[in-house]
Image (tube, rainbow, N blue to C red):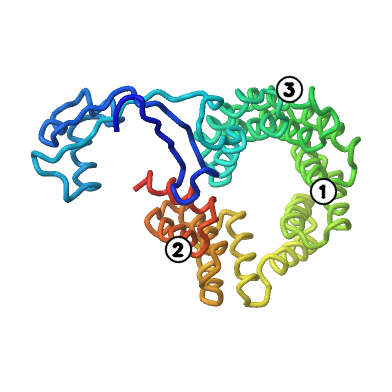
Amino acid sequence: MKPGDRLHCYWNLVSKERRKLFEAEVTDVEVVKFKDLIINDSLAHEEGFESAAELEADFRRTYPDDTADGSLFQVIRFKKLPVDEWEGKKIDEKAMITKRADLLFDVGKFNKSVVCYTAALKIDPDDVYLLNKKGDNLSRLGKFQEAIECYDKALEIDQTNEFILNNKAIALLNSNKPEDALKANDMAMGIDAENVVVLYWRGFILEMLGDFQGALECYNKIIKLNPEDPEVWNAKGNILSEMNRTEEALESYDKALELCLDEEPDASTWNRKGNALLELGRLPEAVECYSEALKLDPKNDVILSNKGVALMELERFREAVECFRKAVLLNPTNDDAKILRDECLENL
């Protein structure tokens, strides 16, 4: 390696061009002995370590056979090149950043995912999907006013998107503005009065405003449209409890449990049950379900990834890494498992 050489950096060498990060030109190459490297704090900082001691520990773990005093290491300095100067195949940088943002968002890494959404919006500031997702992300971080600003910008571009209007309503509700939330929900209902997501949140907003009968009517309408949703049956049970209609509430809760848990024991059903429990935050039970599914279908990379996500949420990172590692071995094109595996490794 010498100055002027070209570097090609990828997410994963196996997927090469498809997962390219950047190209760069080498500006300087310095050869350093290991004994000098481990006492050079300045160089350690340049390499992203807090201290030379931290660098030494990392290098001894990573390069156990190359830590003699005289072992030589190259320090390569480079400058990133604009995409239009690349020699190899170009990437869709926005799509790549968005994919990573979505994965980080889905596993609850909101501080990291919001950075990615912001970076993607610098490439395309009028992307409605990104504006909406950044708004969702900011809501998860409790930054509701900033979220509303994202939704408003998205609505300037797409005025008839009931999902974004509904998300704005949720942010307003979380900002303790239930009346304003209902107005936003009214607009969403005006676009599609049978959208079950909009109806569900309308019920919740009406419940917060003390209109239990109105909320109950929303949940009943959803059940007519989709009687197989356990979450809605559970919400109906909650409203009926508030209205002191205990027997009817118990019937709703029983129906919710029947839909969520009473299924035949095949791998697909165990996996769906695990997904339902994961959604409800019942993580240990979700892990048990995925384990049962894997007994029946041990080479299913999707179920392995799902189990990895549940373990990740429980901060059982070593077990999660093993799940993601197996998933990638079974299906090398499972990019989600690769990214989540790397996220877990950062926490070890």
Which label belongs to residue 63? none
Q: Name the foreground residue: 14 vs 149.
A: 14
**Residue 270: where, in percent of width, then height?**
61, 70
Q: Left or right of 331: which side holds 125?
A: right
Q: Quadrant of residue 95?
A: top right
Q: Amino acid at mark 2?
A: Lys
Q: Residue at x 8, y 39 (%)?
A: 69
Q: Amino acid at mark 3?
A: Lys
Numbered disc total: 3
Q: Amino acid at mark 1?
A: Val
Q: Residue at x 74, y 26 (%)?
A: 154
Which label belongs to residue 326? 2
Mark 1 lies on a secondary structure that is: helix
User: How many C-alpha atoms fall within 10 Å of the one at disc 3: few (<14), some, or many (≥20)?
Assistant: some
Q: Left or right of 57: which side holds 21?
A: right
Mark 2 lies on a secondary structure that is: helix
Q: Which residue is mark 3?
A: 153
User: How many C-alpha atoms fall within 10 Å of the one at disc 2: few (<14), some, or many (≥20)?
Assistant: some
**Residue 314: where, in percent of width, then height?**
45, 53
Q: Quadrant of residue 151?
A: top right
Q: Which residue reaches farthest left?
A: 69
Q: Which residue is mark 1?
A: 196
Relative to residue 91, is residue 61 depicted above or below?
below
Front disc: 3 or 1: 3
Q: Earlier in the sequence, mark 3 or mark 1?
A: 3
**Residues marked 2 and 1 touching at CB (< 8 Å):** no
Q: Left or right of 130: which side holds 8?
A: left
**Residue 138: where, in percent of width, then height?**
60, 30
User: How many C-alpha atoms fall within 10 Å of the one at disc 1: few (<14), some, or many (≥20)?
Assistant: some
Disc 2 to disc 3, C-alpha distance:
42 Å
